[in-house]
Image: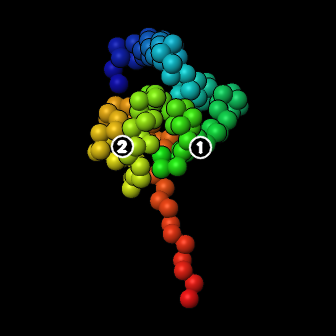
Amino acid sequence: MSRNRMQHLPGCRAGLALLTLALMTGAALCGAAEPASASASTAAGHPSAAAKTKKSPAVPIRLIDINSASRAQLKTLPGVGNAEVDKIIAGRPYLSKAELVTKKVIPTGPYLSLKNRIIAMQKIPPKSSK
């Protein structure tokens, strides 16, 4: 390496450190604090700080069966009001939750916001004993 390039390395390191700090600060301000804080703590050599910032496991969302749920249960879904509840109940039974869109019960946008919170269970007839 030439002598000129070696003289500029300390300045590059300081510039890189400032750029990294600015990116981490900007990400934290934009709401992406989890990845920035984890990388910042491991980059600083403090793995114990990363362990402290980890979130606890999320509570699983209880799925609502659109074929058997009550009006009150259906109204807890995001974007579902009285009119949508009436349409959902009138269109029962559903073979799949996607039928809410294919049967034009609700538009695609609201469906995308609630598809991970619903299920369409099928009633299984009891087996006849011979």
Disc 1 secondary structure class: loop
Left or right of 56 in this view: 120: left
How would you rate the neighbour count of disc 2 (Cα within 10 Å): few for under 14, some for 14-19, many for 20 or more? many
Q: In front: 120, or 22?
A: 120
The label nearer to you, 2 versus 1, is: 2
Q: Position of residue 80 (x, y in %)?
A: 45, 30
Under circle 2, the secondary element is helix
Q: Nearer the viewer, residue 20 or 88?
A: 88
- On the image, the x and y values in percent for residue 12 come to 42, 14
The residue tagged 1 is 62
Classify the position of the C terminus by image quarter. bottom right
Q: Dot 1, how many residues are within 10 Å of its Cα: few (below 14), some (14-19), or many (20+)?
A: few
| Residue 91 to residue 19: above or below | below
User: Where in the figure is residue 1, as x and y percent of width and height?
Assistant: 35, 25
Residue 46 seen in this snapshot = no
Q: Position of residue 3 (x, y in %)?
A: 36, 16
Mark sitting on residue 100: 2
Residue 14 in the image: above or below residue 99: above
Name the residue located 32 percent from the left edge and 33 percent from the top edge. Answer: 107
Residue at the bottom extreme, as displayed: 130
For residue 29, side relative to residue 48 (left or right): left
Q: Name above or below for residue 83 compared with residue 126.
A: above
Q: Quadrant of residue 109?
A: top left
**Residue 76 occupies quadrant:** top right
Corner quadrant of residue 100 = top left
Q: Residue at x 56, y 26 (%)?
A: 34
Residue type at numbered disc 1: Arg
Which residue is found at the position 47% from the left and 59% from the top?
A: 122
Q: Are marks 2 and 1 in contact (CB under 8 Å)?
A: no
